[in-house]
Amino acid sequence: MLGAGLIKLRGDSCWRDLTAMCYHYETQPVPNPLSWRLHHTPLWVHKFETMANHVIELALPFLLILPWHAARTLGGVAQVLFQCTIIASGNLSFLNWLTILPALLCFDDLFLSRFFPSSLPSIEALNQRAWEWTPLLCGREVVNVALLALIIRLSVPVVKNILSPNQMMNTSFDPLKLVNTYGAFGSITRHRDEVILQGTNGDRWDRDAVWKEYEFKVKPGSISRRPAVITPYHYRLDWLMWFLPFSDSRRHPWLYHLVAKLLRNDALATSMIAKNPFEGGEPPRFIRCELYRYEYTKPGSEEAKRGDWWTRKRVGSYMQPMCLDDLTNVCEEMGWPDPKEGISPST
């Protein structure tokens, strides 16, 4: 939590002027239906959310290491509720669910007995048992101390990284990756650009060619399709598509591999998308990638009344139309099979 909070303060200015949440709900990797509503809340709500994020990530984590029962419990409750709000506001795969697990360790039997009185001993019995030392308990404490010493030793470079003005996100400092540094959304994009794949059986440069769109399972595509709720499941392909607009297509060779597969109507590749416009027929001759800017529809607008969740406009071309012949060299450079292998002369 502390690393995630510091990377935000050291990163994008919108975290410091408390406007980050004005953009997050619209530009996060995979929004859900509630994201649309949260995006349209007033500015003061977004600023409160951003400030609350700073408090929970930068101040409250220290409660987790204090020796007082009440402090640890309060810190654990805050972290669990924080993660639950993130889970409710978007699809960030299993990340937040996993973050809840260590927070549960803040709740001891004395605290949990208030919620499960029939399955746990009484508080008086727990208090008495806490002071009953046995050889097994002593052995466990030795293991606990040894584990604590190991974690402290492995955490030294992590702490140095957190304190450094050049803090790195999502980095491991030991071969077994036991203790790592983490930070998310240090930068917030101000707009949402989406790469849309389109195929045609016409000529690639013909203005009258009909280009049909591929629809992915959860990433924004059709402006009328309601955002999905998939957490804690993780659609990795849709997640990777979110990163494409941040850099040139040549930085993402896997995209060329995907296009090569779609040009063959490869069953495995098409199983990872929601709609293949060439299913059951001839595969496309060419596929191109177009860049569109997406924005949420506004409540009460004509688009929203029609049932649209998004508006979009074309920004430009992300990847020029390509055929299998164009992709042969790319696949060869990456050590992938020739995309034309296995295709009969008739196709």
Image: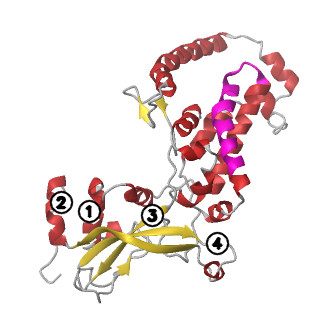
Q: Is residue 89 visible?
A: yes
In space, the residues marked 2 and 3 are separated at their CA atoms by: 25 Å
Mark 3, secondary structure of its residue: strand
Residue 40 vs residue 114, the one in the foreground: 40
Compared with 216, 129 (above or below) is: above
Look at the image and say whether residue 54 sits in the magenta stretch: yes
Rendered image quadrant of residue 131? top right
Rendered image quadrant of residue 31? bottom right
Magenta stretch bounds: 47-69
Picture coordinates of residue 104, whole percent (x, y): 67, 35
Q: Badge 1, how many Cα within 10 Å: few under 14, some, many 20+?
A: some
Q: Are marks 1 and 4 in contact (CB under 8 Å)?
A: no
Look at the image and say whether residue 3 sits in the magenta stretch: no
Compared with 36, 68 (above or below) is: above
Give the labeled residue for mark 4: 298
* Magenta-colored segment: predominant secondary structure: helix
Left or right of 22: which side holds 218? left
Q: Are marks 2 and 4 in contact (CB under 8 Å)?
A: no
Identify which residue is drawn at 55% across, 72% down.
Answer: 310
Identify which residue is drawn at 82% across, 39% down.
Answer: 115
Q: Badge 3, how many Cα within 10 Å: few under 14, some, many 20+?
A: many
Give the labeled residue for mark 3: 193
Give the labeled residue for mark 1: 256
**2 vs 3, front mark:** 3
Residue 130 vs residue 6, the one in the foreground: 6
Query: Count of labels shown?
Result: 4
Q: Is residue 339 visible?
A: no
Mark 4, secondary structure of its residue: loop
Left or right of 343: which side holds 281? right
